[in-house]
Structures are given as C-alpha cells and as structure tokens.
Image (cartoon, rainbow, N blue to C red):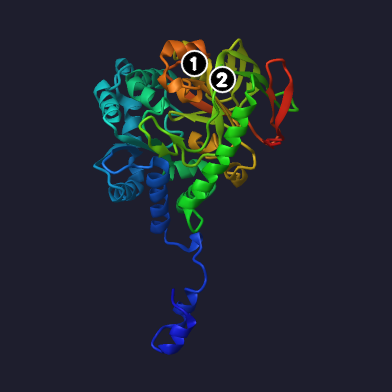
Amino acid sequence: MLRLREVAANPNLDFMSSVATLAPTTFASLPFAQKLDRLAEVAVRIGLGLQPGQELVITAPIDAIPLVRLITEHAYKAGAKLVTTFFSDDATTLARYQFAPDGTFDYAPAWYYDALATAYRSGAARMGITGANPALLAAQDPAKVSRANVAVSKAYKPAMELITRHAINWTIVASASPAWAALVFPNDPPELALGRLWDAIFSTSRITSADPVAQWREHGANLKKRVDLLNAKRFHSLHFFTPDGATDLIVGLADQHLWAGGGTTAGNGVYCQPNIPTEECFTTPHKSRVNGHVTASKPLSHQGTLIENIRCTFKDGKIVKATATAGEAAINKLISTDEGARQLGEVALVPHNSPIAQSGVLFWNTLFDENAASHIALGQAYSTCLIGGEKMSSEELSALGANESLIHVDWMIGGPTMNVDGLAADGTAQPLMRNGDWV
C-alpha cells in the first residue's frame, strides 16, 4: 500500500490516486470481474474443497460461461487433473416441449447419466451451477414435464445416490441470468435487474468481506455449534405451528437421526460445503410419522414450473391432499412420481434473521429460498443424516424411517410467524423457534 510519505518523497506520483489507496477497498467498489472471481474462488476452495489430482465435473446453464471459466481457472490452480463442463440452454430445452413427438418424453439419455455416475465413482468432484429461467416451462403441458422429470430421475438415480450419500465432495453455486433476473425484479430495466440479482447473489453467498474464505469458515463453525446442540437434544419430533393455523404439523424424526449443517466430510475424506449459500440445520424425518397440515411460505420453482401457495395434509407420513393456487397439477404430478414422493426426506430449520430472508428478495430458486426459511423436502432422504447411515443398505435405512424416492424437492414453510417446538418421546415440548428465529 502506498503511504503519504512516499507521495511527499516523490512529487511525480499522482496525489489523489495515492490517497485513494489509504481507504479500505469496499466490495461494492470492486470491478465486476473481481467480484465474480471471488465467488469462483469460494466455490472451489470452500464449496468443493477440491483436492490436487481430482477431476471436476460441472453442469451449468450457458449464461454461466463467465463464472465457469473462472471456476475452471481456480480448479486448475488447486491442482485439478481435468475440468469437464456440460452446458444446458433454455431455448433448446423449451424447443423440446414445443416440437418433440409426444412419445419421447419418457426417454432420458441413460448414457449421459451413466457417465456421471462413472465419473463420481472414479473420484470426480461435482459442481452444479444454477441460474436457468425458473419459469421456463410454466406454460408447457405439466404431464409432459412430469414424464420427462421421472425419466431423468430414473436415469440419474445411480449418480444421485452417490450425492445423497455424500460419497463425493460436491457443491452448488449460482450464476445470474437475464431471464432469472427479470422474474426476480420484474419492474426494473433488464440491465438493472441483472445487476441487482448479481448483488444479491454476492451478498447472500457471503463473499463481500475482506476475506470471504475466512468468513465462510467462521460461518460453518457457527452452524456446527447449532447442529451439535440439536444432536444433543435427541428430539423425537418437531412441531411446526403458526398463530393463524395455516400450519400445524408434527414431523417425527427418524430413529438414530443426525442433524447436519454447513460443511461436511464426504465419504472420500474431503471436507466440502454442499450449498453456497447455506443457513440451514437439517435432518431426516421418519417417513411414517408426519401428521397435520402445512402451508408453503414461498412459491416453489420446480423444473421450470412455478407452484404457488402449496397446502398439504399429511396422515401417517403421506400427503393425502395437496392444493396450490398456481401449478396445482404440477405438485400433484410431482407427488405421484413414486410411492416415496408423498413422504418427507428432509426437514430443515432456518432462522428468519438469515441474510437471505432479511434481503427481502424472493429468488424463485430453491438454493436461495430454502435458506431463507425453514423447509421440508419431499422424497429421498440423505443417508448421512442417520448415525452410520452412509454404510447402511436401503433396507436398513428404511427400517429406521428414512424415505426412498426418485425425487428430492425442497419447499419453504418457515417465516416471521413460524414457531417450532422440539418434542420428546413423552410429548414434552421445548421451544426451538419463536416468530421465525431461534429461541
């Protein structure tokens, strides 16, 4: 850093530019390229914990090319053996639903998903970049969307099991796109909307401090403290309820459940941060011990379809009724995917004072919106959220209450009026959250 005495000693130096270096550089003043580079560095170092000699497989929308290039640079600097990226494109995805023969929607390219599974089994790390248009398929036939999603889920299952068991180090990070920005900030001109979305991503992804890597390590340590407290309590179930009665739901917890949050050590021994951003503490519900009704607090964007104001009634673990003011056909198609699609695979606690909730932004993207509110997930459970679960068979996991399904779809139920109690086996209640925040 240039000092004033150096300016005095050398009259040829420009005084104003020299004085400017005396003030700390704020994140807002950085060029966009440097901000994006910070996100890429955090994604590789904190998100993946990428190891020398590892391969990296990236999936990304085509609008994310600038971020992909920077992530690739940081991956090679970290010692990556090879970085391979598979791109998707909204326009060509939409073209399928507009022009492809009806009989083709039950097909998914098994060769592609087999290749992903082979890569993961061979030690490759996985990075997903989200940012496609959340409303891309909103006007398309929900039956076709459902059929295509089921086909993909079946083909992807072998690779997905390696992810849900945390056998590999993986992470998800976001890249803004014009279509996504237009949905989040519909009243702004396109360039302003895109800039605002990038600012929201940078802020909630915790890269705005002078040392974002250190900030993430501190954040992870704080989440671990909360996780350790919840694990020590050994609650039998959780009671979610709101003063207006919109939600009154008891979620039983799986036998030998294990709370998780923040970073995790994958089965290959690599410590990673699966979601950037993340604010949640989550665990595995018991698939047969969920009763009551629940109302979504935020819309759900699933595979390009927007589903709003979801309300579900559970009995003995299964959804017996599901309604929505928009996308009702889509939510009912979703829960009909297979037997486990009507049951829960995850329950998560997120305080309303999290940075994402306090931003006031509805992202229409599960990666962000699930970290703004407590949530539940339909479908597949994470085996790592059971004590010793990563080494158990499907039958052993099921016996403890873990759900199995082709899907895993999070939707938000928390907010500023949500209350949560932890219940002991005898029904004794201990307040965990009041008005959306930790007690």
Q: Amino acid at mark 2?
A: Pro
Quadrant of the image for the C terminus? top right
The answer to whether residue 373 is seen in the rendering is no
Q: Position of residue 96 (x, y in %)?
A: 32, 27
Q: Is residue 248 left or right of residue 382?
A: right
Q: Residues within 10 Å of mark 1 (few under 14, many from 20)?
A: many
The mark nearer the N terminus, 1 or 2, is 2
Inter-mark Cα distance, 1 to 2: 8 Å
Q: Secondary structure at mark 2?
A: strand
Q: Is residue 223 left or right of residue 392?
A: right
Query: Residue 223 is drawn in which quadrant?
Result: top right
Residue for badge 1: 403
Residue at image location 26% in from the left, 41% down from the top: 53
Q: Position of residue 325 (x, y in %)?
A: 59, 24
Q: Secondary structure at mark 1?
A: loop
- Residue occupying the far right of the picture: 243
**Circles 1, 2 touching at the beta carbon (< 8 Å):** yes
Q: Position of residue 272 (x, y in %)?
A: 42, 38
Looking at this view, is 38 or 46 the one in front? Answer: 46
Residue at image location 60% in from the left, 13% down from the top: 289
Residue for badge 2: 285
Looking at this view, is 133 or 46 the one in front? Answer: 46
Q: Residues within 10 Å of mark 2 (few under 14, many from 20)?
A: many
Quadrant of the image for the N terminus? bottom left
